[in-house]
Amino acid sequence: MNSKIPKRIIQVWGQGEDNLTPFGKAAVVNAKLLNPDFEYLFFDDYRIDTFIIEYFPEYRKMFDSFRFRIQRYDFFRYLAIYHFGGFYFDIDVFLYKNLSDLLKYDCIFTFERIGINKYTKKKYNMHWDVGNFAFGAVPGHPFIQAIIENCVRAQKDPEWVNIMLKSIPWMFRKDAYVICTTGPGIVTRTYAENPDLRCLVKILMPEDIYDRKNWSQFGNYGIDLSCYETQSAWRKKKRNIFYRKIWNYWYSKTDNKNIKLAQRDKKALMPSKSI
């Protein structure tokens, strides 16, 4: 593909821009200030519904059938970037650099963390996750299209999803279900199972994968602060001593071996210095 990512930022908050948290408002203002020549599009629930009806009516019924609201927001972000092109950022993402240097790419995603799903490790030798909290692409990019198609498949074929969920402890499967059907799990799986599309995607890798503080960053351009403080049910469970012990035991299996394998992938993807 020869086109470039358009100068456009897309963000979502279901209750509307006026009801953002103080941090959310600061993050939005900061994104605009750092990128003054970018078009900014903000979507609440009403605008999302209008967008689906106008541009993707074929997905309306499926969109309404998602069990969790976050699945709708996940699916919408892929549709929006596929249609408009540009960059999508979660409200929790705080940018600290202008995005213009990234416009030369057709499609750009980022390393999120060391993978926790045994399925993608064993089947695809994929030891790290591709994040969906921040990404960009030209309109109609085939990788975004593949993600959309896999979201549809996940909704229609439970067994296709269950093979990823089997390795997750039962008390975390509700959150893992979202991750594996519309979240970073589906993006990672799409990336892993499509070698012909991987060459079309630029992955921003952290300079030091061993340092967990470098995870959930959008290269040198921003960071997803939800990894430090979030209201998700998953991390609420982790605050409970019982759940936290189970989580720590299970996640401890993500050891230095997996980090070394991710470091190997980084070298293959980025022979030069991180951007």
Image: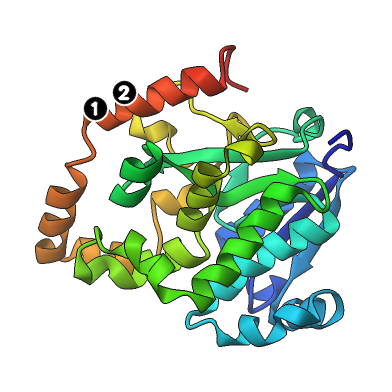
Q: Residue at x 53, y 79 (%)?
A: 69
Q: Position of residue 98 (x, y in %)?
A: 75, 34
Q: Which mark is residue 94?
A: none
The quadrant of the rendering that contains the C terminus is: top right
The relative height of residue 200 versus residue 163 in the rendered view (above or below) is: above
Q: Secondary structure at mark 1?
A: helix
Which residue lies most toward the top here?
272
Of the residues shown, which amino acid type is indicated by label 2? Lys
The residue tagged 2 is: 260
The type of residue carrying mark 1 is Lys
Q: Residue at x 64, y 37 (%)?
A: 196
Question: Dots 1 and 2: beta carbons under 8 Å?
Answer: yes
Q: Is residue 275 left or right of residue 156?
A: right
Measured as percent of width and height from the top left, residue 199 is found at 65, 31
Left or right of 212? Residue 11 is: right
Along the line of sight, which residue is nearer the eye, 214 or 192?
192
Q: CA distance from mark 1 to mark 2?
A: 5 Å
